[in-house]
Image (spheres, coloured by chain):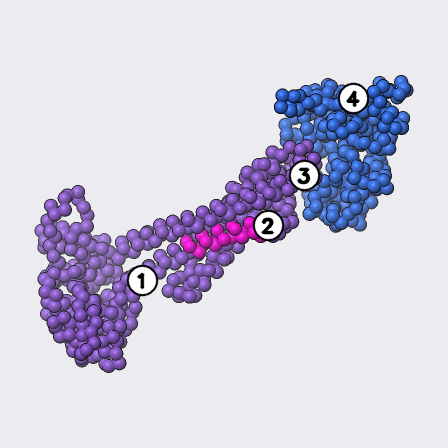
Amino acid sequence: MIRLSKIWKTYEMGTQKLHALQDVSTTIEQGEHLAIMGPSGSGKSTLLNIVGCLDQPTSGEYFLDGEDVAQLSDDDLAEVRLRKIGFVFQSFHLIPRLSALANVALPMVFAGVPAAEREERAREAIDSVGLADWSDHKPAELSGGQKQRVAVARAVVMRPGLLLADEPTGNLDSASGRQVLDILCGLNQQGITLITVTHDPNVARLAERVMVLTDGAILREVEGRKVSTLDDLFSPVASGARDELA
Amino acid sequence: MMSGRDIVGFAANALLEHRRRTLLSLLGVAMGATAVVFLTGLGEGARLFVRGEFETLGSNLVVVLPGKNETAGALPGVGGVPNDLTIEDARALSRELRGARAVIPISTGTDLVSFRERRRQVAIVGTTRKFFDAMNLRVARGSFLPTAELGRGSSVAVLGNKAARELFQDRDPIGEVVRVGDARMRVIGVLASRGTQMGQNIDDMLFAPATTVMQLFNRSSLRRIMVQLNAYADADAMVEQIIAIMTERHDEEDVTCITQAAVMESLGGILRALTLAVGGIAAISLAVAGIGIMNVMLVSVSERTSEIGLLKAVGARGRDILAVFLIESALLSAMGGVLGLALGRSLLLLVSYLYPKVPATTPLWIVLSVLAMAISTGPLFGVIPAWRAMQLEPVASLRKG
C-alpha cells in the first residue's frame, strides 16, 4: 500500500521557484491499477519518480508498505527499488550489448542471485511475455513491442509488489501497444499494484482510477471506466458530479 | 550485492562493445609498460654485463695506488705529498703479505713503437709474468714475459694482438726487434685477441718487464701495484695487511687500496640507480596512458548515462556502479600491462640476439613492479569517471535516450 501525504517537489530556477508537485496526497491500495494523466509538465513523471524512489520529494511523507521512504539512505532506496518496484519506460532502456535474456536477468545480478537460478527465472519471465524464442537476440534485433515486453519481463523478474509504467505504449503502434497493455493488466490481475503514466485515454480507461494532474496539483480523480474524452478530463469544471470520486 | 564475477563479466562485456576504442587505450598502457620493461631490462643487462666483465678478470684483485683518497678536511698540500710506490714496496709486499698469490708491479706510459717503416702509438705496460695469469690472458704465439727477479728488466716485449698485426702484418713477430721510444726490445710473444675490457683495449698494448718500462720513461715510481689473492683469502683483511705494511714503510698511511668487490659494488650501484631513473622516466608514459584511460572512461560514462540510470532504477547501488567502472578501467590497464610485458620482453630478446654480450634479463622484480604499476594505472585514473557515474542522478540520466 502506498500513502502519499502533502508531497511537494520544488525546483529553484534562479530566483524563481518552480513547483513540480504541489500538495499531492493520495492512497493507492495493493493491487490497484492507477493511471496518472496530465499535459506535459504537469508533474506526472515527477510523481512517478518519487513513487518509484528514484527521486525524493522536497517535503511531504511517503509510506511504502508502512515504511517511511523519505527517511531512507541511497543504498536503502536502491534496495527498495530492487525488491519492491519494477519500472517500464517509454523508451524501453534495454542495454544494447546484452541479449534479451541477460537484460531480463539484470536486476537479479544486483540482488546477488546465483547464475543458474538467474537463468531459470529469466527464462520463466521471458516465456511469460511470449518471447521464449527471442531470448538470445540483442535488443536491436527486436521490434518495439518485443523490446517493451522484454522490459516488462525485466520489471517483474524480482517479483515486486509495485509496477510503474511511464508511457509504456508511447513508442508503440496500437497493435503491439495492445499486447503490452494486456500483459500489464494481466500482471495487475495477479495482484501487482500498477501505476501507469499516460497521455492516452484508451490506456487510462483500463485503470480503476485516473488521477488528473495540472500544474503539479491533483485536478480531479475519476473512475477509469467513465473516461471518455480528454476534454472531459481537463475541463476546468468537471462535466458532472458523477465523475467525482471523492 | 553484485558478485565479483558478475562485475568483471559486466565490465568485460562493456569493453567488448567498443573493441577499437578498448584496443587503442589498451595499447597506450602496453606501450608504457613496454618502455618500462625494455629500459629497465637494458639497465639490468648492462649491470650484469659489467659484472660479467669483472668476473672474466677471473681472480680476486686488490689494487694499491699511491695517495690517500680521503679528504680529512685539511687544505691541499698540508698533508704532504704522498710517497711514490716503488719496486722496493712491491718487493716488500711480496715478501710479507700472507694470503697473496702474486704481487704485480705496474708501470705505464705511451710511446711510439716501430718496426722498420711501420710505427704506431701504443700503450706500454711494464709488469711481470704474473700479470698475464691474473688477467686470464693467453698467448697466441711465443711466450709471456720471463719469470725474473723483480728489478732486473731485460729488453723483451709481448705484443697485444692488434699491435702485432698493425706493426708486422703477415710476418711472424717472434724474435724480431722493435724500437720503443729510444729503446730496442725483442718480441717474445703475441697475445690472443681479447678485445676491449673495462674500457682498455688490451689488444693494442705492449707489455715489457716493469723496470725496463720505468727506465724507458725515466721514472723511479710505479703507477700501481696489483695484489692477487689466494682463493680463500679475505679482501678486507688483505687490505688491512697491505696498509699496515705500507704505513710502516712510508711512516704514514699514504696508499689507497681498491678491491675488485668494492669497484663492482659501486659500479653496480650506479647502474642500478641509472636503471631506476630510466625506468622512472618510462613510467611517466604509463601515467600518460592512464590519462588516456581516464579520457576513454569519461566518454564511456557520458555515452552510457541512460544505462547507468537504468541500472540504478533496477536496484544497483552507487558502489555497484563505481565497481563496474573501476573494474572496466582496471581490465583495460591490466591487459595493456600484460601485453606490454610481452612486447618489452620480446624487444629485450631481440637486443640480446643482436648484441649477444648484453644479457636479456627481466628479473622478477621488474615483472612484478611493471604489472603492479600497469594494473593500478587503470583504477587510479578511472576513479574520476567511475565517481562521476556513481553520482549521476537516476532521474536525469533516464531522461537521456
The residue closer to the viewer here, B278 or B272, is B278
The residue closer to the viewer here, B106 or A38, is A38
Q: Amino acid at mark 2?
A: Arg
Q: Is residue B166 left or right of residue B29?
A: left
Tag shown at residue B53:
1
The subunit carrying tag 2 is: B
The subunit carrying tag 3 is: B
Dot 2 and dot 3 within a common chain: yes
Quarter of the image for the C terminus of chain A: give it.
top right
Task: Tell me the residue at 22%/55% (across/down).
Answer: B258
Instruction: Work out how far the residue at label 1 is from the one at label 3, CA to CA, in angstroms.
Output: 64 Å
> Chain B's shade in the image?
purple
Q: Dot 4: few (<14), some (14–19), or many (≥20) neighbours within 10 Å?
A: many
Write down the residue under mark 3. B306
Dot placed on the residue nearer the N-terminal end, 1 or 3: 1
Q: Secondary structure at mark 2?
A: helix
Tag shown at residue A213:
none
Instruction: Work out how far the residue at label 2 is from the one at label 3, CA to CA, in angstroms.
Output: 20 Å
* Bounds of the magenta segment: B23-40
Q: Secondary structure at mark 1?
A: helix
Q: Is residue A110 left or right of residue A44?
A: left
Number of numbered discs visible in the structure rendering: 4
Tag shown at residue B21:
2
Q: Is residue A208 visible?
A: no
Q: Amino acid at mark 3?
A: Ser
Write down the residue under mark 4. A218
Dot 4 and dot 1 within a common chain: no
Instruction: Work out how far the residue at label 4 is from the one at label 1, CA to CA, in angstroms.
Output: 92 Å
1 vs 2, front mark? 2
State which chain is coloured blue: A
Q: Main secondary structure of the magenta part?
A: helix
